[in-house]
Image: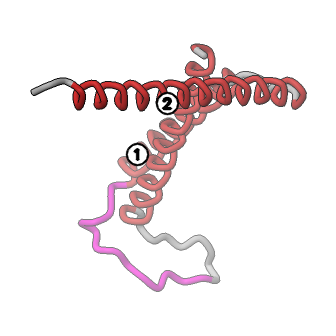
Amino acid sequence: MLQELSHMDRITQLQDEIQQLLTIMANSVAYLTAKANFTQVSPDVPITKHRNPEKVDAPEVFEANKKEMVNDLMVKAKQIEYLINSLPEPEPEEIQAHRLQELEQEMSQANEEYIRAVNRAKNLYKKAKIELAIQPA
């Protein structure tokens, strides 16, 4: 059971890391679309839109920020890869089926014990109620 919890912890960590990766990606796209200047990439395609120079980062700042975003993405991707590689190999279907049968038997036994306990509690309650009714006031 403890080992299963450890696997679940890794899966939760993996989910958190993927969420962080998506956040980094979304922030990167938002930054790139907000702070990039429009440049002509082909002599055949003219620039048809201009951005206010105050809203555009200087080219060296923009390049430094792009490199930092790429680095952040790479680090997060490596963390995710490490977590994926640390997950256990899946069990063969036969072992899973056998384990599920055992769990089902345990659950069935626990349910029977619960029903017996509830019935015993009901009987004790009835017995106590009868004894209280019989006692003189």
In this view, 37 is above or below 90: below
Residue hosting label 1? 65
Return the x and y of residue 91 as percentages of the image width and height.
81, 25
Are discs 2 and 1 less than 8 Å apart at CB?
A: no
Give the mark toward the camera: 2 or 1. 2
Q: Residue at x 45, y 71 (%)?
A: 38
Callout 1: 10 Å neighbours few (<14), some, many (20+)?
some
The disc at residue 119 is 2
Which sits earlier in the primary sequence, circle 2 or circle 1? 1
Structure colour scheme: secondary structure
Report x, y in % for residue 126. Answer: 36, 31
Give the Cα distance between marks 2 and 1.
Answer: 69 Å
x and y percentages locating residue 45 in the rendered image: 60, 82
Q: Nearer the viewer, residue 47 or 78?
A: 78
Number of numbered tags placed on the structure image: 2
Where does the image place residue 116, in percent across and percent down from the top left? 55, 26
Give the magenta part as a residue range: 45-58
Density class for disc 2 (Cα within 10 Å; few <14, some 14-19, many ≥20) is few
As helix, strand or loop, the secondary structure at mark 1 comes to helix
Who's the residue at 44% across and 49% down the image? Answer: 23
Is residue 75 visible in the rendered image? The answer is: no
Badge 2 amino acid:
Asn
Please determine whether, in this image, residue 43 is positioned above or below residue 121. Answer: below
The residue drawn where x is 46% and y is 55% is 26
Query: Could you tell me which quadrant the N terminus lies in?
Result: top right
